[in-house]
Amino acid sequence: MIQPSHPSLRSIREKVESQERLSFEDGLTLFAPDTPLQEVGELANLVRERWNGNAAYFNINTHLNPTNVCVYRCIFCAFRSDLRDPKGYLMDDDQLLERGQEAVQSGCTEMHIVGGLHHQKKYDWYLNLIRLLHGAFPHLHLKAWTAVEINWFEFLTRRSPRSILAELIDAGLGSMPGGGAEIFHPEIRDQICEHKADATRWLDVHRAAHELGLKTNCTMLYGHLETAYHRVDHLIRLRELQDETKGFQTFIPLAFHPENTGLSHLKKPSALDDLRTIAVSRLMLDNIPHIKAYWIMLGIGTAQTALAYGADDLDGTVRHELIYHDAGATTPELLSVEQIQALIRESGRQPVERDTLYREVLRSSENPTDWHIGEAIPIPTLS
Ligand code: V47
């Protein structure tokens, strides 16, 4: 039994133990620097183990960013390029297929596809990219296009998100990543990415996806201009949509990396802030099964520690990550399966390879590129 010494945690602890929902005020208390991190972490660990026992999930995945050319100028982004900037690139079909081939040959089950909103590319280019890759590699799960991209397709086509998503699913879209959420509150969103999909539009796209049976992830970009108030507001908006649809699988808190961005004068969030944010997310998001500690962005040591602070997933082995490496991430470009399993074991957890939809992946020991999907990993029903 956990015995918190801090008085403001007492009622929160009672709520967590009786599986009662935490309030906005509770969220602010948990984020307050004088609320002991260790105790917040212990409470988050309780919830983490309730949901996921001792398992720590990972997958074998690759990233594909087909273009970095983007009409938007989000000030936190080091990846984007102007159309005529020499840094700008756009992949052709051969390059896309080569990436798919490499993914399949290296045993990947997932390709995470996001990129810029290219000034000269119509919606059909994004649709055909999914069709091309799915046609060539039907067993590779395509987790593609953020809600911001879907919202851009709405603008290009004057169609509803539902009709666009239905067409993308038909072309081979398997799920949607959680990017583009940043911070929903307009006080911050209007300063960091004023032109792109606002909170309502971002949430509407995910609602439409969930209604079509598509699973999606959700994120929060923290450690820039926002305060604890904006973080709690963000988490509660996600929690409310999840109450309605149950379509989110994983929440990924994304630590801001300032290098080469319009906010390069800011310091990166500390490891303590990273751990607290993960723990508070686990406690506030009482209806989302998984919390991801994205090792690329946290660094390996913090990601390992996060497995005791509420996180149950490390994302994947990852190849070709650009968004964080362009913004100064010093983590390796990829980990081998043995490395990711070893670092999970070192933190006292049991590594489980999953596919994008949280089903166990079973691999042949002689030939690791020969895999099949096992049982769906059971998710407890928590009230
Ligand atoms: O939307 C961009 C963020 C996101 C920076 O769904 C930055 O499984 C920090 O969403 N510093 C894209 N963050 C990445 C993303 C993601 C990552 C891993 C797994 C999943 C998933 C989704 O990265 C963007 C933005 O919020 N971002 N620039 C930066 N300088």
Image (cartoon, rainbow, N blue to C red):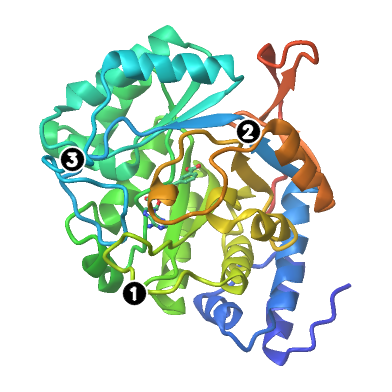
Residue plotted at (44% across, 40% down): 177
Residue plotted at (57% across, 59% down): 285
What amino acid type is highlighted by mark number 2? Asn
Residue at which label 2 appears: 59
Q: Position of residue 315 (x, y in %)?
A: 59, 42
Q: Position of residue 203 (x, y in %)?
A: 34, 50
Name the front one of labels 1 and 3.
3
Residue at which label 3 appears: 86
State left or right for residue 125 relative to residue 84. right
Name the front one of labels 2 and 3.
3
Residue plotted at (75% across, 60% down): 308
What amino acid type is highlighted by mark number 1? His
- Asked whether the beta carbons under mark 1 and mark 3 sit within 8 Å of each other, the answer is no
Disc 3 residue lies near ligand 1 with CB under 8 A: no
Residue plotted at (58% across, 83% down): 29
At label 1, counting other C-alpha atoms closer than 10 Å, the crowd grade (few under 14, some 14-19, many 20 or more) is few
Quarter of the image that includes the C terminus: bottom right
State left or right for residue 229 relative to residue 1. left
Residue at which label 1 appears: 265
Q: Quadrant of residue 88?
A: top left
Q: Earlier in the sequence, mark 1 or mark 2?
A: 2
Mark 2–mark 3 distance (CA, rounded to whole Å): 34 Å
At label 3, counting other C-alpha atoms closer than 10 Å, the crowd grade (few under 14, some 14-19, many 20 or more) is few
State left or right for residue 69 relative to residue 229. left
Closest to the observer, 14 or 179: 179
Is residue 343 positioned above or below 65 on the image? below
Mark 1–mark 2 distance (CA, rounded to whole Å): 35 Å
Quarter of the image that includes the N terminus: bottom right
Is residue 289 positioned above or below 36 on the image? above
